[in-house]
Image: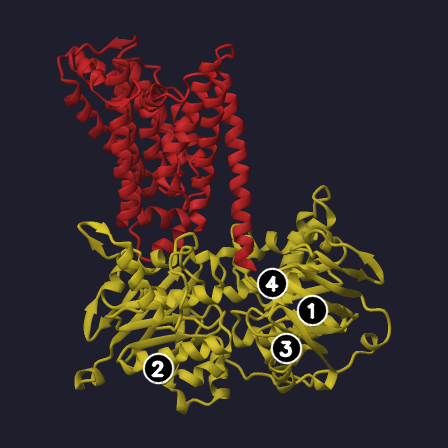
Chain colours: A red, B yellow
Amino acid sequence: MKERYLPILATVGVFVVAYAIGGVAFRNFLSTTVLGNMLTDNAFIIIAAIGTTFVILSGGIDLSVGSMIGFVGVAMARLDTLGWHPLESGLLLIAFGTLFGAFQGFIIDFCEIQPFIITLAGLFLLRGSCFMVTLDSLPIQHPFIGVFSDWHIALGGGGRLSASALVMLFMLAVAVAIAHFTRFGTNVYAIGGDRASAQLMGVPIRRTTVMIYALGGFYSALGGVVYALYTASGYPLQAVGDELDAIAAVVLGGTLLTGGVGLVAGTLFGGLIQGLITTMIDFQGSLNSWWAKIFIGILLFVFIVTQRTIMRSFMLRRAA
Amino acid sequence: MNAVDAQVPRIELRGIDKNFPGVRALDGVDFRLDAGEVHALLGENGAGKSTLIKIMTGALAKDAGEILLDGRPVEIDSTGQARALGISTVYQEVNLVATLSVTKNLTLERQPTRHGLISWRLANERARERLKRLNLDIDVERPLGSYSIAVQQLVAIARALEEDTRVLVLDEPTASLDAREVELLFAIVRDLKARGIAIVFITHFIDQVYAIADRISVLRNGRLVGTAPAAALPRLKLISLMLGRELAHAEDRRKGVETAAGGEPILAAEGLGRRRYMGAFDLRIGAGEVVGLAGLLGSGRTETAKLIFGALRADSGKMRIDGKPVTIRSPRQAIALGLGFCPEDRKAEGLIAELTVRENIILALQTKRGWLRQLPREEQESLAREMIDALGIATPDAEKPVGQLSGGNQQKVILARWLVSRPRILILDEPTRGIDVGAHAEVVALIRRLCKEGLALLVASSELDEIVAVSDRVCVLRDRQKVGEIVGADVTRDNIIHTIAGG
């Protein structure tokens, strides 16, 4: 067994156990409807979290994710009132998000400033900009919204694989290919593992850093587009704090916050575990929905401690 | 090799200058390297070897001077460009990424692709081929960090070796290799040399220089002080070139300390061990006594030291200090009991690179006092100054971050840290690793002086000569077991080797 698969096995294990508990405790929990809804409801956050995975793998952090989702939503809604097709405005905003991320990456590397601060500035900038676009919730009324939300693949048993979920799964596959089968992907792991060594080994640090945050911006903007299409609206306070959900998904997915270790595919399960917990709270019925946060918090804590232990025994074996 | 190669140097550096804030690291250095030669680059710590190499390999920009490759002037702005020109480097510390697999480390930035995506099957094959040249057969898909430092070093060399490598720089490649591995490496170096590759070899081991080098260049204080064929440069001349002074001959060492034979030892370990880490061993150290830990790489020297110091908890055996039974659970407790430990891997385990020289020096003393009783600033400064003078630490002042000092000076800072804390038992793991000849003699002299003052010393070293020079008694280790103990006049190189080899 390769060490690198241990964390993701833990993640998948938790997912399966939680799923089984839900199946035993609640009627109709194991239906494809629940699965389909879970994939659809969490598609945007998982898409955003995929981008965050690259950032965290490189040893960085991106706090601008939630604001980006919010900004893309209100901008799409505003452009909708000007008669833009959602796909056109979506593409424009994805391009904007990518450039915005690239700029953050450039500043991080060029000025040697902690990603935390730069992306925190990005968070405030974008969130403030949301209110420049609109102060109220704006609907997106283009007929394409209906087309997008109706389109699906039947899963059998009444479940549906929605367009949102498909976009998410496709973009996950793309991300897996980037992470594991391109030089850029390997460089991300190298920089996260040991930045100084990576540089000595000829890894282009600046280009890679710019690309990492550009990818983060791309995925969070895409998450914003999917979210806007899913909710058919833009609201300036949309997705406040979602960057933290994205980070939680990444960490629950087995990626080390210190960088260098983790699998992009793990983030799917990290995101789904959060969705699963929320769904179970919903099924339970009597519990306040904030209990989901409490359980996610406990789970995060347990995960971090477990990872730490795994890494320590790994280091020990190396010393011995 | 054609005639052009014989006349035009493969790479030539002319009048290289490099300044760092407050230090003139290189001052008009000329360096010439021919195809098919092994050129040893020597110098004390801080002489400018690393700086010169970094300029040659694109890791640092030069302030003035020019570089000619096969007679043509070239500008080397990045490590990537240096490699494109056929200049490859293996640095002193293993500069690979421990969390990546061996294959990924070997193929970073040059992975074979198919249809635009990396083919890991091909990459793994190439990685295995590369390692085969070094007779290394390991699972290339496992993380590099799961292998020993020696294997990591060989992987680093395997990475540097290219089909089109014209210049290979080996920056202290043998520092963490045992004798067998060094031989293996030298065989590879000779093979490369025969293929016309120009090799720069940096080391502190004088024996190795004469074993492998064709020519020797010596740097001192940022200047080139001499270049000569190895055969025309006697040892004594070489060392005096490096030091800029004659080497004082080591005084005859004293033998058999009285306290060691008779009375109660300061420290006694009985059957101390840890499962799957170090076999149970007995060890006694008396006041004023130096006990050496000898053995090959991986024989358990560091492990023994760590168990005694409590850096790893023993799961069997007993320890007594001054006859009283103690159980050491942590280094903090060990320090309180009067133990000190200078680790081998100073980068990872000893120094805090961001803290200043002064802060690093007072660290252990402060820990011993407890953080509530802060050492007065003046006292800190005077202690730091005293140590900088006594050990000859080359630093502009005590407030310089330790990370900016050269390797040997970092080692001295660690030593200073333990000296100011006045331990009764000091453990030195590889006290002279990465230290040049001059500092080496100083450190050995210091060890002797300490013992005269009644300090008990445990010295672990891979250099047998060093062990023989300082030890009253030697514990010989093999494969994480103590296999023998040699006392007094019997402590000789031959006897240790016999014990390691014998039954």
Q: Which mark is residue B467?
A: 3
Point out the tag, 3 or 2, that comes first from the N-terminus: 2
Q: CA distance from mark 1 to mark 2?
A: 38 Å
Image coordinates for residue B497, horizontal then vertical, percent: 60, 83
Chain under callout 3: B
Q: Considering only vertical position in the picture, is B131 above or below A195?
A: below
Q: CA distance from mark 4 to mark 2?
A: 41 Å
Looking at numbered disc 4 in the image, what kind of residue is underneath it?
Ile
Q: Give the number of the mark in front: 3 or 4.
A: 3
Residue found at x 49% / y 87%? B235
Q: Give the number of the mark in front: 4 or 2.
A: 2
Task: Classify residue A91 as left or right of residue B124.
Answer: left
Chain under callout 4: B
Q: Nearer the viewer, residue B214 or A237?
A: A237
Point out the tag, 3 or 4, that comes first from the N-terminus: 4
What kind of element bears circle 3?
helix
Chain under callout 2: B
Looking at numbered disc 3 in the image, what kind of residue is underneath it?
Ile
Q: Nearer the viewer, residue A94 or B238?
A: A94
Image coordinates for residue A147, horizontal then vertical, percent: 17, 16
Badge 1: residue crowd in 10 Å (few <14, some 14–19, many ≥20)? many
Instruction: Identify the residue under disc 1.
Output: B458
Point out the tag, 4 or 1, that comes first from the N-terminus: 4
Instruction: Identify the residue under disc 4.
Output: B388
Q: CA distance from mark 3 to mark 4?
A: 26 Å
Image coordinates for residue B124, horizontal then vertical, percent: 31, 59
Residue found at x 43% / y 24%? A276
Q: Nearer the viewer, residue B1 or A141?
A: A141
Q: Considering only vertical position in the picture, is A168 above or below A178?
A: above
